[in-house]
Image: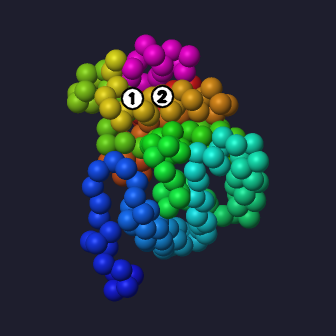
Amino acid sequence: MTDLVDTNTLAYSGRALTAAQQAAASVGQGLLVHRYQEEFARHDLVTGQVLLTVDDVTRRAHYRNAHQTFAKLLELGVLPIVNENDTVATDEIRFGDNDRLAALVAHLVQADALLLLSNVPGLLRNYPDESSLIASIPADRVEDYLEFAKDRMKKKVLGAAEAVQGGVKRVIFGDARVSNPVTQALEGRGTVVS
């Protein structure tokens, strides 16, 4: 692929989305989904790419269509790989972070649980002291815990509350740095919002 497109020329800076950024996103999304397909194929799993914009989960007709697509993929045993559709998104209609997108998709597919991975084991009362892990947060009391959340973790906590309020039973913050992070999170290592 890089023989066809010099990905260095697609680099950008600044906040506003431009045609160059959207073009870079189209290249990046293709490379990313190809990598997922290769990795999951090693486990005999088929993946399908689903690109979403805010409209897809906020406008009724789009929401219904997205819901039907996810339902059919899951019925067929296909693992959906979800990403924001940066090739058509503008600053005004962006999710802004993957945790919010994950929360909205969890609601869309009526998931029982949502796992959000990070570079820390969960919400820490005294960051970066990992022994200060907060094991459980009631979704209706998230505001009481925001003082402990820094930057991206604050978005995770707010996204988790949004997911639980939307019907997801629990959201788990897991540590992506450990081996088998999904298994460890499901075994109770991390912070659970419910």
Where the C terminus falls, by quadrant? top right
| Residue 170 visible in the picture | no
| Amino acid type, callout 2 | Leu
Could you tell me which secondary element the residue under label 2 belongs to?
Answer: helix
Q: Is residue 68 left or right of residue 168?
A: right
Can you tell which quarter of the image residue 110 is in?
Answer: top right
Relative image position of residue 100 (x, y in whole percent): 51, 39
| Amino acid type, callout 1 | Lys
Determine the CA span between mark 2 and mark 1. 6 Å
CB of mark 2 within 8 Å of CB of mark 1? Answer: yes
Residue 158, numbered label: 2
Residue at the spot 39% in from the left edge and 29% down from the top edge: 154
| Residue 176 visible in the picture | yes
Majority secondary structure in the magenta region: helix
Residue 154, numbered label: 1
Can you tell which quarter of the image residue 173 is in?
Answer: top left
Relative image position of residue 21 (x, y in whole percent): 38, 61
The reply to whether the magenta stretch includes residue 107 is no
